[in-house]
Amino acid sequence: MNTAVQEKQKKVILITGASRGIGAFTASLLAQQGHSIIINYANNDQEANAVVQRIQANGGTATAFKANISHSDEVTQLFDYAIQTYGRLDVLMNNAGIMRLNKIEDVDDETIDQLLAINLKGPLYTMREAAKRLAHGGKIINLSSSVVGMKLETYGVYTASKAAIESLTAILAKELRGKNITVNAIAPGPTATALFLEGKSDELIARLIQAAPLERLGTVEDIAAVLDFAVNEGSNWVNAQILRVNGGIV
């Protein structure tokens, strides 16, 4: 492959919630391939800047932009920044999310509002903006969760937010007919990140490990490898799909 073609395939990628976990690891992986990365985050300046510095130290291109995606005006500013800084935006990766576990009868209004604001409204705002502003041939990649299929107790509101994302994924893919923009969702199973491990007993973690035929938790490397596929040219004919990455747990 000649250099001109290789250069053409380098993308400008916006990753929400990319200051840690799957988002941070994926940002570094994609930057190593020559893609330009916008690290979006909501709170932790230090963690976000550390990701950018690691990427730049390894010769990659990355910048950070602080925006709470549950606020539509901040999403608009985020997209403005991306396009003003890099001239275009090729990929939106909706990675930001929170997890709160409660039985439905016990969940309070504040928890419902927080989960839906960040896990549903946020990605919906970014998808709406991406539908208007992504470059021709762009990609929208949403992070769902395999709990949509597992239907675990105490995961009710979280699961509802991710099930909605899966429906929006398929519908937006159809609505973008003629724009050559694909929309897909990656649905990890139990993955050893801070988001997953927080608040879980050793007994519960052991039970989830045994639930998968491969008898382990997923790793950020497992998930990032699939996100890498979703970003790059090999996935160009994949559209409106939900890909479960969970070691066979469901």
Image: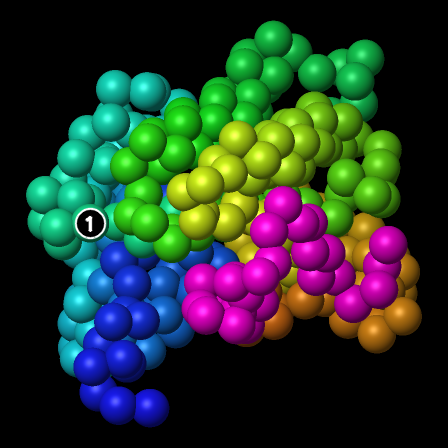
Residue 78 in the image, given as x and y percentages of width and height: 23, 35
Range shown magenta: 225-250
- Residue found at the very far left of the displayed protein: 84
Q: Nearer the viewer, residue 96 or 129?
A: 129
Q: Nearer the viewer, residue 169 or 99?
A: 169
The image shows residue 66, relative to residue 191, as above or below, that is: above
Residue 218 in the image, given as x and y percentages of width and height: 68, 66
- Residue found at the very far bottom of the displayed protein: 1
Residue flagged by tag 1: what amino acid is it?
Answer: Arg
- Residue 137, by quadrant, is bottom left
- Residue found at the very far front of the displayed protein: 178
- Residue 214, by quadrant, is bottom right
Q: Nearer the viewer, residue 138 or 46?
A: 138
Residue 230 in the image, given as x and y percentages of width and height: 52, 62
The image shows residue 76, relative to residue 84, as above or below, that is: above
Q: Residue at x 39, y 34 (%)?
A: 131
Query: Is residue 63 covered in magenta?
Result: no
* Residue behind mark 1: 88
Residue 96 in the image, given as x and y percentages of width and height: 45, 41
Q: Residue at x 84, y 64 (%)?
A: 248
Q: SS at mark 1?
A: loop
The number of callouts visible is 1
Answer yes or no: is residue 39 visible.
no
Quarter of the N terminus within the rendering: bottom left
- Residue 4, by quadrant, is bottom left
Query: Is residue 238 covered in magenta?
Result: yes
Quarter of the C terminus within the rendering: bottom right
